[in-house]
Image: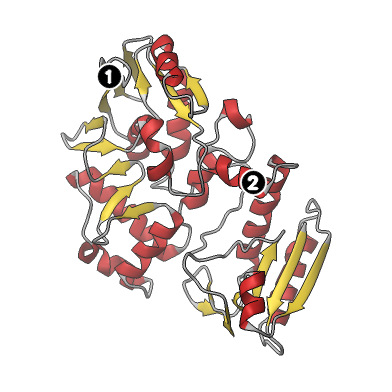
Amino acid sequence: MRLTILHVPDCPNVATLADRLGEVIAGRGDLDVVDVNRQVVDSEQAARELGMTGSPTLLVDGRDPFAEPDRAASLSCRLYRDETGQLVGAPSVAQLRGAIVESAVLGSADAGIDQAARVQRDCCATAADAGDSAVSLEERRARTAPTHPAGQAVHRAILRAFASTGRAPAAAELESIAAVHGATAHEVLVNLHNMDAVRLDADNQIAVAYPFSATPTRHRVRLTSGIEVWAMCAIDALGMPAMLDTDAVITSSDPANGRPVTVTVADGRYLWDPVTAVVFLSATAGSDAPSAETCCNDLNFFTTPASAQTWIDAHPQLRGDILDRARAEHRGQRIFGTLLHSRPSAPGDPVTWRG
C-alpha cells in the first residue's frame, strides 16, 4: 500500500496528518504499507494533475478516500469534519484507520484488477460474481451508512418517518435534529446524498432512503401498523421487517410473467407464495453511481428459478445470482436489520463516515 500526503509548502497540518498515519500503521501490523511519502504541490496545475483538493490531501494507492463530489483542485487549506462534526485540519486516527483498512480490503479483493474494473464491480457485486469478497452489496450499504452523529441522527429520523407516515419527511421536519449537532438539515441531507445513504431529487426533496422509496415501485410493503410503504428492491423489502422489528406483508410481481409474489413476515418467519419464488441479485456492471440508478431496478422477485433465468437471458447485459428464499432473507436481514440501532457490520470494519 502506498500512502502519499499532498501539501503546499509549510502546511501546518502536514505533521498532524503524518503523526496520525504513523499511529494507524503502528497499530495495524496486518497492513502492508510500502511507504509514506510527502509531496509538495506548488501550482494549481499540479494540484489538478495529482488530485489535491486542498492541503493536506491523503492518497491511498492514488485514491483520495475523503474525496468530496464536485470539490475542485486547490492549493488552499483543506478542512475535514471529525466524528463530532468539528472542522479540523486533518482526519482523526479513527477516520484514517477506517479509510486505510477499507482501501486494504478493496485492494486484496481485487488484486490484479485495474481500477476501472473495480469501479464496475463496486455497486452490486454478488456471491456469484465476487464470492464472499469485500466488494459486496452488504459492504456497499455498510459503507454508506452514516456513523457521524449528525448524519446518523437525521438518517434514522428519515427512516422512522417513512415507517410511521409512509412518506419522506421534509427538510424542515429534520431541522431541529440536525441543529442539535451544529448542522443544518440541508447540509446533512447533501452529505447523505453524496454518500448514497439517501437520494435527493431535483428539488432537494428526499426521493430514496434505502430501503424506502418515496414513489411507487414494484415492491409494496404493508406494515402491521397499517402503513404502506414502497421498497427500492426485493432485498430492501425483505430487510424492512427486520429493520423495523415488525410483521409485514410484501407484495411484488414477477417482471418476466407478471404473476404476483407475496411474502408474509410474522414473528420473524418469512412465508413465501409461491414457495418456488426466488430473488435475482444483480451485479450490474456500471460505475460508482448510486444504487438507485444502477442496480435497484434489477433486484426483483421471480415466481420460479426458471422464470428468473428466462428474464436474465432476455437481459444479457446483466450479471448476478439467483438467490433462494433463505439466502434472500438473510441478505435483507443482514443489510438492514440493525440499521436503526447501530451501523451494519461487514468484513473489513471499521468504516467511518466521510461526510
Q: Left or right: where does residue 145 sit relative to residue 175?
A: right
**Residue at disc 1, secondary structure:** strand
Q: Check disc 2 and give the amino acid type.
A: Gly
How far across and how far down the image is residue 301, in percent? 36, 22
Q: Which residue is drawn at 66% across and 83% down?
A: 13
Q: Quadrant of residue 254?
A: top left
Q: Which residue is drawn at 21% across and 45% down?
A: 164
How far across and how far down the image is residue 37, in percent? 79, 71
User: Mark 2: few, some, or many residues within 10 Å (few <14, many ≥20)?
Assistant: some
Q: Left or right: where does residue 234 sit relative to residue 51?
A: left
Q: Foreground: 189 or 44?
A: 44
Quadrant including the N terminus: bottom right
Per the image, the residue denoted by label 1 is 262
Per the image, the residue denoted by label 2 is 348
- Residue 344 in view in this figure: no
Residue extending farthest to the left is 226
Q: In which quarter of the image is residue 66?
A: bottom right
Residue extending farthest to the right is 34
- Residue 46 in view in this figure: yes
Residue extending farthest to the bottom is 10
**Residue at disc 2, secondary structure:** loop
Q: Foreground: 34 or 47?
A: 47
Q: In which quarter of the image is residue 229?
A: top left
CA gap, disc 1 and disc 2: 35 Å
- Tell me whether circle 1 and circle 2 mark residues in contact (CB < 8 Å): no
User: Mark 1: few, some, or many residues within 10 Å (few <14, many ≥20)?
Assistant: many
Q: Left or right: where does residue 306 sit relative to residue 223?
A: right
Quick one: label 1 or label 2, which is nearer the N terminus?
1
Q: Check disc 1 and give the amino acid type.
A: Thr
